[in-house]
Image: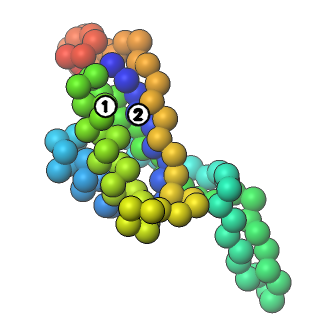
Amino acid sequence: MKLITAIIREAQLDKVREALIEAEIKRITVSRVSGHGQQRIEEMYRGQIIVPDLIPKIKIEIAVNEEFVDITVDAILKSARTNGTGGKVGDGKIFITPLEDCIRIRTGERGGNAI
């Protein structure tokens, strides 16, 4: 089992969600987060150009069994890029981490069946 965490642009959420549903990945968790990396956005505030410290992003978390890791990552990659195949700075990141266990609270099921 793996936990896939993707940080994407807010504007790409609908495309990513639709791509995941099309790939038969239907159980996701979405959070609004803020952060920064290489992306710099300049905004005009009271006639002065400012660069905000934190940029709003979307964090998607998906727990999957091993056979769905590549399918999930491919769906996110294809749909989260803003400039077709090339993408651009600020499109986001995908993290894949091992998931030790998963327990369904309702039934007590554990492991891959609980996902």
Q: Tell me whether circle 1 and circle 2 mark residues in contact (CB < 8 Å).
A: yes
Question: Disc 1 marks which residue?
Answer: 69
Q: Residue at x 23, y 25 (%)?
A: 67
- From the image, state whether disc 1 or disc 2 is nearer to you: 1
**Circle 2 sits in a helix, a strand or a loop, which is it?**
strand
Nearer-the-camera pick, 8 or 86? 86
Q: Residues within 10 Å of mark 1 (few under 14, many from 20)?
A: some
Q: Residue at x 45, y 30 (%)?
A: 96
Question: Disc 2 marks which residue?
Answer: 4
Image-based side of 56 in relation to 70, left or right:
right
Q: Quadrant of residue 83?
A: bottom left
**Circle 1 sits in a helix, a strand or a loop, which is it?**
helix
Q: Residue furthest front?
A: 86
Type of the residue with mark 1: Val
Q: Is residue 14 above or below residue 92?
A: below
Q: Residues within 10 Å of mark 2 (few under 14, many from 20)?
A: many
Type of the residue with mark 2: Ile
Distance of label 1 from label 2 (alpha carbons): 8 Å
